[in-house]
Amino acid sequence: MNIGHVADRSGLPAKTIRYYEDIKLIRPARDANGYRAFSEADLHKLTFLSRARALGFSIEDCRALLALWEDQSRASADVKQIAGEHLDEIDRKIADLKAMRDTLAGLVRDCAGDGRPDCPILTGLSKPRG
């Protein structure tokens, strides 16, 4: 398959596929003319990477997960550890976002939003955190 075909089938832009090749996540064969020749295995790897990235895994996590995926003697505990650490990070981000939302909601609630210059939002933004 050429890069356009594998891009269509994997749902990834050709630019992303080239990037994954540049950083050695995938290594497609080359035809005699120098063009990339993607195999079904390459397509599976790209689909795997697309899904992992959509779940927010970092490139390095993707590299580790891909290596584990390719290793038939892997321990599922190794996979679970990477996924669990990522889940913990997502939970931290959600907690941070909830705290941000609560703070902003309070500022918006306290602002009259009328023609007066007094604005609790601007006052709140000018205060140090804590």
Image (cartoon, helix red, strand yellow):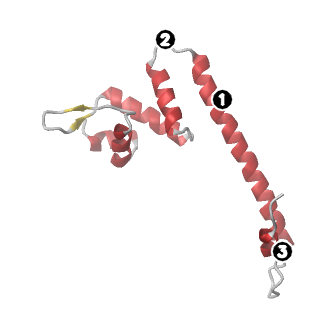
The tag earlier along the polypeptide, 2 or 1, is 2
The image quarter in which residue 39 lies = top left
Assess disc 1: are there few (<14), some (14-19) or many (≥20) residues with their C-alpha within 10 Å of its C-alpha.
few
| Amino acid type at image mark 3 | Pro
Q: Count residues near mark 2 (Cα–Cα under 10 Å), then give few for <14, some for 14-19, many for 20+.
A: few
Q: Give the camera-side residue of 41 and 124.
A: 124
Q: Earlier in the sequence, mark 1 or mark 3?
A: 1
Please give the count of numbered marks on the rendered protein. 3
| Pointer 3 local density, CA inside 10 Å: few below 14, some 14–19, many at least 20 | some
Residue behind mark 3? 120
Q: Are marks 2 and 1 in contact (CB under 8 Å)?
A: no
Q: Residue furthest left?
A: 32
Quick check: 130 left or right of 30? Answer: right
- Closer-to-camera residue (99/127): 127
* Up-down relation of residue 116 to residue 84 (above or below): below
Tell which residue pokes out farthest to the right in this image.
110
User: Of callouts 3 and 2, which one flags the residue occurring earlier in the amino acid sequence?
Assistant: 2
Q: Position of residue 129 (x, y in %)?
A: 80, 60
Q: Which quarter of the figure is the C terminus placed in?
A: bottom right
Q: Secondary structure at mark 3?
A: helix
Question: x and y percent of residue 52 in the render?
Answer: 51, 36
**On screen, residue 43 above or below 118:** above
Q: Is residue 49 above or below residue 101?
A: above
Give the secondary structure at mark 2.
loop
Please state the horizontal and vertical placement of residue 89, each as a whole percent of the image.
67, 39
Residue shown at 28% from the left, 41% from the top: 3
- Looking at the figure, which quarter contains the N terminus? top left
Of all residues, the one furthest to the front in this rendering is 128
Q: Name the foreground residue: 128 vs 52.
A: 128
Residue tagged 2 = 73
Residue carrying label 1: 84
